Amino acid sequence: LSEQARTAIKQVIAAEARAAAAEREVVLLRERVQELIISSKEVSAALIIVEKQTSHAEGKAEVLSEQARTAIKQVIAAEARAAAAEREVVLLRERVQELIISSKEVSAALIIVEKQTSHAEGKAEVLSEQART
């Protein structure tokens, strides 16, 4: 064989080796693409799950926020009722003090009336005795 033929054969062998290596690389790249597609699907599925969980958490947060607002309103209303009750207690204590004072005044007046009645009865007896004599 001529030198050219040998060189040409060597070039063909080298080209076939490169072609075989390229084919192996294509197979490996296709496998990698399949892995990436599967991985992408898994990531998409995971993202859907995360989005659902996030949506659920947001809904739950809204419910809890509304419950907190309601609880705050209830606390404010309870504080207002407590303040009103405290004012009523103060007014009732004042009224009780007025009634105690009034009761003492009535008792004092009754004592005076009883003394006057007793005195008048005594005077009536004296006058009645004098009238008989």
Image (spheres, rainbow, N blue to C red):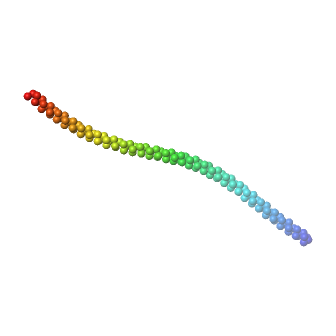
Q: How far from the left and from the top, in percent, is residue 111?
A: 21, 38
Task: Give me the residue at 16% from left, 32% from top.
Answer: 121
Q: Residue furthest top?
A: 132
Q: Nearer the viewer, residue 42 or 131?
A: 131
The residue sitting at 69% across, 54% down in the picture is 40
Q: Observer-nearest residue: 65 or 113?
A: 113
State the residue lying farthest toward the left: 133
Q: Residue 9's x, y, as percent?
A: 87, 67
Quarter the C terminus occupies: top left
- In the image, what residue occupies the spot 68% across and 55% down? 39
Q: Position of residue 132 (x, y in %)?
A: 9, 27
From the viewer's perspective, tell me whether residue 51 is left or right of residue 29.
Answer: left
Locate the N terminus and report the quarter of the image it occupies: bottom right
Q: State the image coordinates of residue 97 (x, y, percent, origin top left).
A: 31, 43
Residue beneath the point at 83% across and 67% down: 14
Tell me if 110 is positioned left or right of 71 in this view.
left
Q: Which quadrant would residue 116 be assigned to in this image?
A: top left
